[in-house]
Image: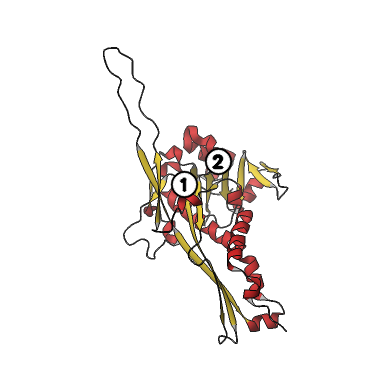
Amino acid sequence: MTQTRLADVIEPDYFDKYVQVKSVELSRFRQSGILVDLSSQLFPQMGGTTIQMPFFNDLTGNSDVVDDTQDLTINNITTGKDVSVKLYRAKVFGSTDLAGDLAGSDPMAAIANRFAAFWVRDEQAVLLNAVKGQLGAVTANQLDITGLTGSAANFDPHSFIDACGVLGDHQDMLAGFAVHSDTYKVMKKQDLIDFIEPSDGGEEIPVYQGKYVLVDDNMPKSGSTYTTYIFGPGAVAYGKASPKVPVELERRALIGGGMEYLVHRRFICMHTRGVKWSPQVNIPAAPTPTNTELADSGNWTRVYDNKLVHAVQFKHKLG
């Protein structure tokens, strides 16, 4: 049998672009508009581990009463800044020649074909950990009904309205939310989900109270407590960039009778607008944070007015 080598089927530059494109196609979070791609702003250059994202604060105060005996007061506009953190991630998959020979097909070809789906799952795990930590620092945007008695602790149309309502007059900015599949099952039983067909003719999209529903079993679940995240369009800034060597192929002739590796590296950023990375002492332990460090609310600080952070953390039980 003539074994196809990895170098015969992978061209590094093309492979990196292919994986990035396929990742976009596969990610419901990006399709929903919750994530906004700000790669050019988040990665203007590769130096450093954080990214400064300055913004103007809103205009404040009351209007002046005009009096021809007094001059009008000149007011200024103030500024602030988000600080997002770069994440440097990599993954290596490999296979021996013998494994392919015995399987009758090429494992490395399968690895190459499935890398995009791997990154989608990995990035969604990064996103959920980052949002957990970032919203944990915005206490005004949290609703926890799990301590209530009986059905009052459960997800239902009324409690969902209450969760959206924590943003007050900005609640109409919320356009989609992510739930665990257990929560989604309860929603379907309530018979309040509509389905719309996307313009590209793809899979129908569930809609609940006019908001897109994203189902992910990586959503936080602890015992009988579930966490649902509700987002506005562009609530999370997403960015990606390629390091010096994004894709690398290697063959080791003496290991296992012959072995090949495919290495894929990337810089990414997942950042809820309105908070800043302000890590505790000795965080991160490595050059860039782990998912666990991202999920720690002690490493984040709110910098926007809470109503301008268009995301809500809703903790509930299920009936």
Please say whether residue 183 is visible from this viewpoint.
no
Q: CA distance from mark 1 to mark 2?
A: 16 Å
Vertical placement of residue 71 versus 235, above or below: above
Q: Is residue 298 left or right of residue 204?
A: left
Q: Is residue 267 left or right of residue 215?
A: left
* Residue type (three-letter) at the residue carrying disc 1: Gly
Q: Which mark is residue 160?
A: 2
Q: Residue at x 34, y 36 (%)?
A: 78
Task: Say what secondary structure mark 1 lies in.
Answer: loop
Residue depth check, mark 1 versus mark 2: number of the one nearer the observer: 2
Residue 3 placed where, x, y %? 68, 81
Counting residues from the N terminus, which is met first, the one under dot 1 or under dot 2? 1
Q: Residue at x 28, y 18 (%)?
A: 71
Q: Residues within 10 Å of mark 2 (few under 14, many from 20)?
A: some
Vertical placement of residue 250 versus 277, above or below: below
* Residue type (three-letter) at the residue carrying disc 2: Phe
Quadrant location of the N terminus in the rendered image: bottom right
Can you identify the residue that label 1 sits on? Answer: 147
Q: Residues within 10 Å of mark 1 (few under 14, many from 20)?
A: few
Q: Is residue 50 left or right of residue 14?
A: left
Where residue 216 sits, quadrant-wise, is: bottom right
Please say whether residue 21 is visible from this viewpoint.
yes
The type of colouring in the image is secondary structure
Task: Say what secondary structure mark 2 lies in.
Answer: helix
Q: Residue at x 65, y 81 (%)?
A: 99
Residue 154 placed where, x, y %? 55, 45
Between 112 and 306, the residue placed more toward the observer is: 112
Between 234 and 265, the residue placed more toward the observer is: 265
